[in-house]
Amino acid sequence: MTAEQRRETIIRAALPLVAERGAAVTTAQIARAAGIGEATVFRVFDDKDAVLEACVAAAMDPTHVLQQLRSISLAQPLVDRLVDAVDALDAYLNRMGAVIGALHASGNSNPNRRSGRGTAEPAQPRQRSAGRDASQAATRQAILELIEPEQPHLRLPAHTLTDLFLGMFFGRSRNLHQHTGIDTRQLVDLFLHGAYSTGRAA
């Protein structure tokens, strides 16, 4: 196993533990979950905070969810494409929120603070902001590509509907289903077909 493969194995094992326990997780627990000795963790990472940093970066990395969005079949009806997109993005946001939320709750909201590293590199916030903007742009493009083939049948331009879709689904409360009983498919159907019942004139 290469050093990079070992690193990925440790991060994959650590992510659910960090989401559950935050900074209280120990390197011994991470090593057990990864099926390696604790000393191996420290051959890859300088210390536990370095593992936590890597977990935050992995949780925020949009690479996997963008691959999922791009793999959604255009042969499906639009409603199915958009349901799959919401499910993929929800899973990504929930995973990211669980990791970052657990670290906040355990009093370690910024692992970069160790040894003053969080303040030593003022360019980091700009880099993070640029990365977030690029991720949002790539996500928007992936959703646009799911909607665009239906343009001849749409009342509004596909790019406008893409922005409305993202605003509607990712500005919504995570407890919406609990409060209303409306699931993702019903919400997508409402987005596509409106609130009136079939045959009702607007």
Image: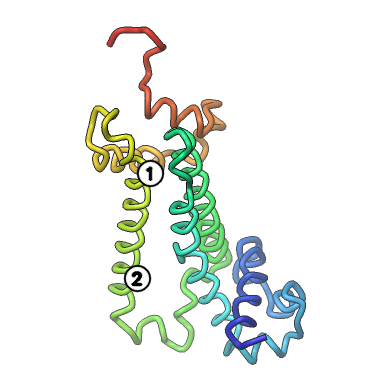
- Residue 90: % across, % down: 50, 48
Numbered disc total = 2
- Mark identifier at residue 128: 2
Label 1 SS: helix
From this view, report whether residue 126 is shown above or below residue 183: below
Q: Are marks 2 and 1 in contact (CB under 8 Å)?
A: no
Residue 111: x percent and y percent? 49, 76
Q: Name the N-terminal-most of marks 2 and 1.
A: 2
Q: Position of residue 124 (x, y in %)?
A: 33, 78
> Residue 177: x, y in percent?
54, 32
Which residue is labeled 1 in the image? 146
Question: Which residue type does callout 2 highlight?
Answer: Arg
User: Is the residue 110 above or below the residue 157 in the image?
Assistant: below
Q: Residue at x 48, y 84 (%)?
A: 114
Bin the neighbour count of mark 1 within 10 Å (Cα to Cα): few under 14, some 14-19, many 20 and up: many
Q: Residue furthest front?
A: 75
Q: Few, some or many C-alpha atoms within 10 Å of disc 2 (few <14, some 14-19, many ≥20)? A: few
Q: Secondary structure at mark 2?
A: helix
Q: Residue at x 33, y 35 (%)?
A: 150
